[in-house]
């Protein structure tokens, strides 16, 4: 992932009244247009950051040095990921579907996104095998 971190002031994190790394809905306003995505606040070296991936930068047209208006809202919804059928089948065949389902949203996403991004069937199959092995271990 090619991501940039946007700093989050300590008082904003405190005002969310949750943990120090709460799940949030990020809304970026640029040129009168809103763009929202789900993220979590991360703590790095005593500072707080939210991730802004290359995909989000592309979707918003944001470039280095742009001034942005960013709003954070505590996200209490349950996060789920759509599991591709071929991955679900492979996990089921290996008896690892329950282990996959027990993973956090971000760990599930970390396994699913590379599979969905595969450009060839061979790469997709290798990534599915790797995901199954990581859940079966």
Image (cartoon, rainbow, N blue to C red):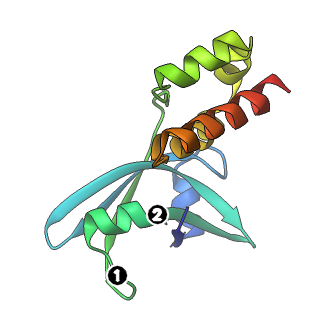
17 to 134, vertically: above or below: below
Image height of 87 relative to 19, above or below = above
Q: Which mark is residue 82?
A: none
Camera-nearest residue between 79 and 72: 79
Q: Nearer the viewer, residue 86 or 65?
A: 86
In this rendered view, identify the residue nearer to me: 7 or 122: 122
Position in image of residue 130 (x %, y %): 71, 37
According to the picture, the residue beneath numbered tag 1 turns out to be: 63
Q: Residue at x 34, y 81 (%)?
A: 63
Q: Is residue 51 left or right of residue 19?
A: left
Circle 1 SS class: loop
Looking at the figure, which quarter contains the N terminus?
bottom right
What quarter of the picture does the C terminus occupy? top right
Secondary element type, mark 2: strand
Which residue is at the front of the view, 54 or 32?
A: 54
The residue positioned farthest toward the left in the image shown: 32
Residue beneath disc 2: 53
Q: Position of residue 96 (x, y in %)?
A: 73, 17
Q: Tell me residue 105's x, y (percent).
A: 59, 34
125 shown above or below 7: above
């Amino acid at each position: 992932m090619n991501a940039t971190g946007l700093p989050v002031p300590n008082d904003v994190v405190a005002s969310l009244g949750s943990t120090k790394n709460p799940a949030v809905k990020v809304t970026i306003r640029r040129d009168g247009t809103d763009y929202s995505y789900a993220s979590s606040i991360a703590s790095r070296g005593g500072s707080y950051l939210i991730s802004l991936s290359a995909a989000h930068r592309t979707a918003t047209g944001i470039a280095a040095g742009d001034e942005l208006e960013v709003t954070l809202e505590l996200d209490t919804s349950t996060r789920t990921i759509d599991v591709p059928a071929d991955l679900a089948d492979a996990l089921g065949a290996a008896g690892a579907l329950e282990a996959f389902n027990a993973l956090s949203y971000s760990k599930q996403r970390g396994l699913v996104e590379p599979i969905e991004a595969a450009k060839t069937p061979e790469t997709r199959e290798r990534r599915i095998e790797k995901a199954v092995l990581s859940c079966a271990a």
